[in-house]
Amino acid sequence: MGVIRKTKAVEVLLKEFNTSATAISAKKLIDELHTSFNKTTIYRVLDKLEDDGVLHSFLGKEGHKWYAKCNGCSASEHNDIHPHFQCLSCGKMDCLPVNVTLPKIPNRKIEFSQLLIQGKCEACIA
Amino acid sequence: MGVIRKTKAVEVLLKEFNTSATAISAKKLIDELHTSFNKTTIYRVLDKLEDDGVLHSFLGKEGHKWYAKCNGCSASEHNDIHPHFQCLSCGKMDCLPVNVTLPKIPNRKIEFSQLLIQGKCEACIA
DNA sequence: TTGTTAATGCAACACTGTTGCGTTATATTT
DNA sequence: AAATATAACGCAACAGTGTTGCATTAACAA
């Protein structure tokens, strides 16, 4: 799979992520870009960019999908496992550049994990 | 809020959780009980049991709601923070009775966190 | 037993996300 | 430059979980 043609939708979405320091929800992208692109297109481009290893996705507190740029991932390998922090005041979602130490759980094979931390970001504490 | 009347729906749902060692999804309860109770009722009873500190809820991999019995929680205080493990083969969701050590994140106030681990449970490894 | 009102059932809705399909546009080939 | 193949698109309709409004029913106290 993956993106094979450089279309306007791909171009615009890539730019969104290249100019954003935080993760972006699919909903927000659709709200902002619905005059230019159909929501189906946006969902499909996000899917493909994730397949390509350009973006990674995870679920926020309401079970909604968020996307952010990957660091050091490829289509075949996704190394970039990190927790996410969502500010409950302003809604901003950050990728935390730290490793998570998973608890020891005997007799189980761990394949994926996701840690979502919620609270107040620096700007909203003050 | 909270449950004030011991209705059949409350009784049946409480029994479900008292006889289950694992967490149960809202969807599964609705599937199993839809002949006896309307889904609206089930959602509302689950909400109230959570408000009462009887159940806790969290989101599974598709963003769907899961519930399990609380240990040592009350309506006013929810102490029982633990990770959850979902088996990708059989779908079983367990509460893991361990503490999670959150990574140090400066300049942020942590209010909630949820850790979802996925993989294979003991029965499905063999 | 009666009265109050919490709890229920139903229908319709809200919302994110998906699917099918005919059309458009990208990129390759001639 | 024109023709061709087909990826990508827009639209409409749908799928699934969860919510809301409102009339009816049932729990419980007086």
Image (tube, coloured by chain):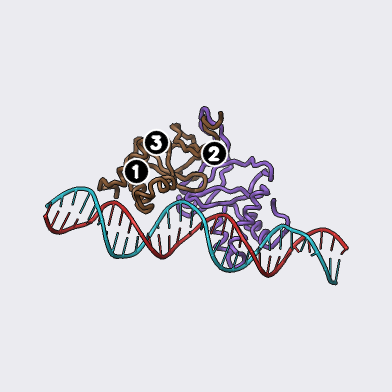
Chain colours: A purple, B brown, C red, D cyan
Pinpoint residue A86: horizontal percent, then vertical percent. 50, 49
Q: Earlier in the sequence, mark 1 or mark 2?
A: 1
Which residue carries the number 2 mark? B88
Which residue carries the number 1 mark? B13
Which residue carries the number 3 mark? B20
Tell whether label 2 touches label 3 (CB within 8 Å): no
Three-letter amino acid code of the residue under disc 2 = Leu
User: Label 1 lies in what chain?
Assistant: B
Q: Earlier in the sequence, mark 3 or mark 1?
A: 1
Pinpoint residue B18: horizontal percent, then vertical percent. 35, 36
Determine the residue positioned at 55% across, 47% down: A58
For mark 3, does the 10 Å Cα neighbourhood hold few (<14), some (14 to 19), or many (20 or more) residues? few
The residue nearer to you, when weighing D21 against A124, is D21
Does D19 appear above or below B49? below
Three-letter amino acid code of the residue under disc 1 = Leu
Mark 3 vs mark 2: same chain?
A: yes
Distance in Å between CA atoms under marks 3 and 1: 11 Å
For mark 2, does the 10 Å Cα neighbourhood hold few (<14), some (14 to 19), or many (20 or more) residues? some
User: Label 3 lies in what chain?
Assistant: B
The quarter of the displayed image where residue B21 is located? top left
Determine the residue positioned at 52% across, 44% down: B61
